[in-house]
Amino acid sequence: MVKPSLKTTSFKHHPVYIQRSLHVDNPFYGPKPQYQRAEVITGGDCETVADWAEDTDGTWDVTAAGSGRVGSNSIVMTQTGAAADSSIYLLLDGPIDLSWAKYVGFWYKGKNGTTYAANDIYFYIFTAAGNYAYANATRYVDPIGALVEPATAVWHYAEVALDDFIMASGYEADMLDEVWGVGFCAHGIATTETMQVDQIEFYTVGTGNGPARGLIESVPLYDDVHAVRGYGLAWNENSGRVDLNAQYDYAFAGICTGNPSRTKLSRAATAGDTTLYLLDPSLFETGKATIADLQATPDTEAVTITAVDKVNRTITVSTGITNSYTIANNTYICMEGNEDGTIRVDVLVDGIVNVTANEIVNQGYGAKCYAVGSALTVNEVNLNEEGMTIGKCMITCADEEDFPIKLTADARTA
């Protein structure tokens, strides 16, 4: 009897090819399973006005049910007195655990033709029983910013990363594993102005305009391109990497759900600094990166990373930064693409996504990219433009309105 032998091979220092198509030493590009959870909190469907309460000062009231963006109803909040910090809030029967969530979003519509300033309205979360007034908010954010509502108001979508909320003094230790409610604070709303809100949803993967629902792929980023959540992306045919989408793009790839190298500053940085302290420098390598903050008018600049120190959590940039950046302004940094294709972004390539219309679009019609840029804006496909179709319109909507389309690779091969 011959004793069987097992032949082994060490691949430690050698690449592996399977029919010369798979190289295991390279980053994996392709479908990326991601946990996509999205939940509407109890009462957050905004179907019942009675689920909501208001401060006793009577200046920011919720007394009406408007037409719903999702479902039959929405809540309508009205400023009935002079501008002041006044809250409308949703109390939960007991605390809920939202520690799994990364984003919160909702539909909103202003009053016809009204101009809103940044910080007119805050959205806040409270994490202690009874602390429902805005003055006791543990986390708050301006989810809407400056807004000029069209003469006939349309629906918009607000999405905010929970990491971008401002932590109120004294509540820094409060976690989202015990949330007692949410609310809206009128911080600068003029008398008679309104805001209509529907479908408050917490979720794990965002698109910049609502939760991701569909197939996500990890793809290489084109040279010197900075891409983050919400950007429309298209294939650069000559390189096999993705770039920002072009107008009427035949090679549309999908919408970016995130740049895996994105992290925040852990210390403020001053103009001229060459050493930057990051929350997680292990996400970086030497090469080009973009640093930006989330102010109403963001500061942003490109830098070149020359060294990464994972022990001291720092990176070194080749020349001093131009702007100063603070923690309060939620400053982030992320890698740009390179010729090696080692910098990846996550892209929703097939699924439901909210986009902004540049004209009236009709249910069932195709949509195409309207313009070059970052945020995805679309208009309707004409009969002779089928190859430009990036997806199908799920509903009929107005100019400047946010609405859902179904991204699909099949539509782009028509």
Image: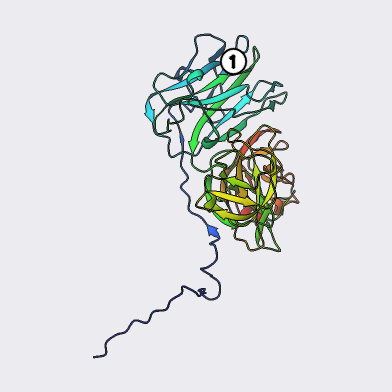
Q: Position of residue 397 (x, y in %)?
A: 66, 34
Q: Give the SS element for disc 1.
A: strand
Query: Taking 208 as reference, is 248 above or below it?
Result: below
- Judge by depth and name the residue closer to the eye, 295 or 409: 295
Q: Position of residue 54 (x, y in %)?
A: 50, 14
- How many numbered marks, from 0 up? 1
Q: Position of residue 239 (x, y in %)?
A: 68, 63
Colouring scheme applied when the structure was drawn = rainbow
- Judge by depth and name the residue closer to the eye, 399 or 267: 267
The residue at the point 59 percent across, 60 percent down is 342
The residue at the point 52 percent across, 43 percent down is 205
- Judge by depth and name the residue closer to the eye, 304 or 356: 304
**Residue at the extreme bottom:** 1
Name the residue that disc number 1 marks.
78
The residue at the point 43 percent across, 35 percent down is 98
Query: Taking 4 as reference, is 404 above or below it?
Result: above
Q: Position of residue 136 (x, y in %)?
A: 47, 20
- Judge by depth and name the residue closer to the eye, 152 or 280: 280
The residue at the point 51 percent across, 49 percent down is 312
Asked whether, in this view, residue 196 is left or right of residue 117, the answer is left
Q: Amino acid at mark 1?
A: Thr
Asked whether, in this view, residue 122 is left or right of residue 172, the answer is right
- Whether residue 362 is visible: no
- Whether residue 334 is visible: yes
Q: Quadrant of the C terminus?
A: bottom right
